Amino acid sequence: MLRSMIQSEDERFAHDPSARGYCPVYRENQVNHCPGCGRTHWYVGRLSAECGFCATALPLAEGAARGGGLSRGHVPVFFTSAPARA
């Protein structure tokens, strides 16, 4: 059991990005062809996009940069300066 947990110099772990190979992702503002059927109609969610014809799901390339709690440059409305009314 211990032998299977020790990594030798020749082998790599599965989470090593250079050993994973080709990983298709959905990119915004580009034409994305489905790897399953080749069509370009997508239903885009928050973390993944699904082909409208064959239901192949792809992760979003920008998935980690979007979402409600991930923006750090947000200034609440009540702290912004509004123009003075006459």
Image: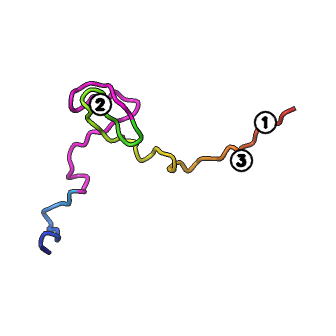
Q: Is residue 82 above or below residue 11?
A: above
Which residue was labeled with disc 1? 83
Query: How far from the left and from the top, in percent, is residue 79?
Result: 71, 47
Q: Are marks 1 and 2 in contact (CB under 8 Å)?
A: no
Residue 38 part of the magenta segment: yes
Q: Which residues are magenta?
A: 15-44
Residue type at mark 3: give it: Phe
Query: How far from the left and from the top, in percent, is residue 27?
Result: 36, 35
Residue type at mark 1: give it: Pro
Q: Secondary structure at mark 2?
A: strand
Q: Report crowding for label 3: few under 14, some 14 to 19, many 20 or more residues within 10 A (C-alpha).
A: few
Residue 72 part of the magenta segment: no
Q: Give the quarter of the image for residue 4.
A: bottom left
Which residue was labeled with disc 2? 51
Q: Earlier in the sequence, mark 1 or mark 2?
A: 2
Q: Is residue 19 left or right of residue 73?
A: left
Q: Report crowding for label 2: few under 14, some 14 to 19, many 20 or more residues within 10 A (C-alpha).
A: many
What separation in Å lies between label 1 and label 2 (alpha carbons)? 46 Å
Dominant SS of magenta comes to loop
Q: Are marks 3 and 2 in contact (CB under 8 Å)?
A: no
Residue type at mark 2: give it: Cys
Q: Is residue 2 above or below residue 30?
A: below
Q: Is residue 39 left or right of residue 7?
A: right
Q: Give the quarter of the image for residue 80.
A: top right
Query: Mark on residue 79?
Result: 3
Number of marks present in the image shown: 3
